[in-house]
């Protein structure tokens, strides 16, 4: 695929997510079209994630195989994994999908229409799903990316659910150029994404949960 034909570079950081990675990749396959590429970056997983990814790609129809790029690297953390993915990306827009999450079938169809209108960032609500079903107090819910209580649009975005996350956002690649995710830090998104939001006025908020965010018991967010 020529670089000028790639609209979306879909980056999938992987680290020991053998339980979830197949569902993630299947949702991406169902949502993608000919203008997409998928860059799977394995951050030195020690479980069976690599084999699952390779088997998935091997079984793809021929028209999909060339759109999937797989890279295994030494474990350096999520920030480095995202940096590597962005460096390999040929698309005009970056979409990061964590390998334990998944997306709706029309995730990129909606973005495609909004990009034609001139938007550089598309932000979706997300549906938070708790892995621990035994705890009755943990109920799935919609996390709104926009806070209606704020007068200023960008302040409302920065006050919404998952404001720092790169996952429920599709961002023009050029906006990443001044920034790099800081390595050896947790919550690496908060050091980049809010600044990118400040760098453009061409932002579109989609008030529908099209990104499904799994709240795992052992994830960084859940642990903290």
Image: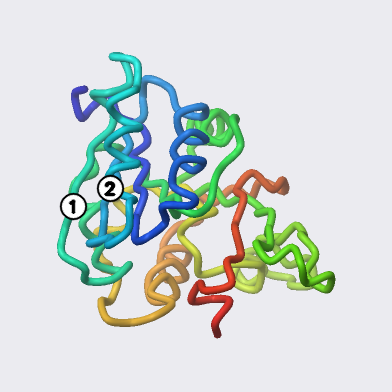
Tell me residue 170's x, y (percent). Answer: 47, 47
Q: In the shown orientation, is residue 104 left or right of residue 85?
A: right
Quarter of the rendering occupied by the N terminus:
top left
Numbered disc total: 2
Tell me residue 6's x, y (percent). Answer: 30, 29
In this picture, is 179 found above or below 119? below
In this picture, is 54 found above or below 13? above
Which element type, helix, strand or loop, lies under badge 1? strand
Q: In the shown orientation, is residue 3 left or right of residue 40?
A: left
Tell me residue 110's x, y (percent). Answer: 59, 32
Tell me residue 94's x, y (percent). Answer: 37, 46
Residue 144: image tag: none
Which element type, helix, strand or loop, lies under badge 2? helix
Q: Identify residue for label 1.
A: 72
Q: Residue furthest right?
A: 136
Residue in the picture at 77% in, 60% down: 141
In this orientation, which residue lies closer to the viewer: 117 or 209? 209
Q: In terms of image quadrants, where is residue 51?
A: top left
Residue in the picture at 53% in, 51% down: 101
């Amino acid at each position: 695929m020529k670089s000028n034909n790639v609209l979306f570079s879909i980056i999938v950081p992987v680290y020991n997510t053998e339980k979830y990675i197949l569902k993630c990749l299947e949702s991406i396959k169902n949502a993608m079209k000919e203008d997409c590429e998928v860059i799977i970056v394995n951050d030195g997983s020690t479980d069976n994630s690599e084999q699952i990814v390779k088997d998935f790609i091997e079984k793809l129809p021929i028209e999909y195989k060339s759109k999937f790029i797989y890279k295994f690297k030494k474990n350096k953390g999520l920030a480095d994994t995202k940096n590597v993915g962005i460096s390999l990306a040929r698309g005009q827009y970056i979409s990061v999908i964590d390998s334990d999450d998944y997306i709706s079938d029309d995730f990129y169809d909606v973005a495609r229409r909004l990009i034609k209108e001139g938007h550089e960032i598309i932000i979706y609500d997300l549906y938070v799903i708790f892995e621990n079903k035994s705890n009755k107090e943990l109920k799935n819910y919609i996390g709104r990316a926009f806070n209606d209580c704020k007068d200023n649009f960008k302040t409302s975005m920065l006050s919404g659910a998952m404001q720092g996350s790169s996952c429920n956002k599709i961002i023009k690649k050029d906006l990443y150029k001044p920034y790099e995710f800081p390595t050896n830090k947790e919550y690496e998104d908060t050091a980049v994404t809010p600044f990118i939001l400040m760098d453009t006025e061409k932002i579109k908020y989609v008030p529908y949960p099209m990104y499904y965010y799994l709240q795992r018991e052992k994830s960084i967010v859940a642990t903290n």
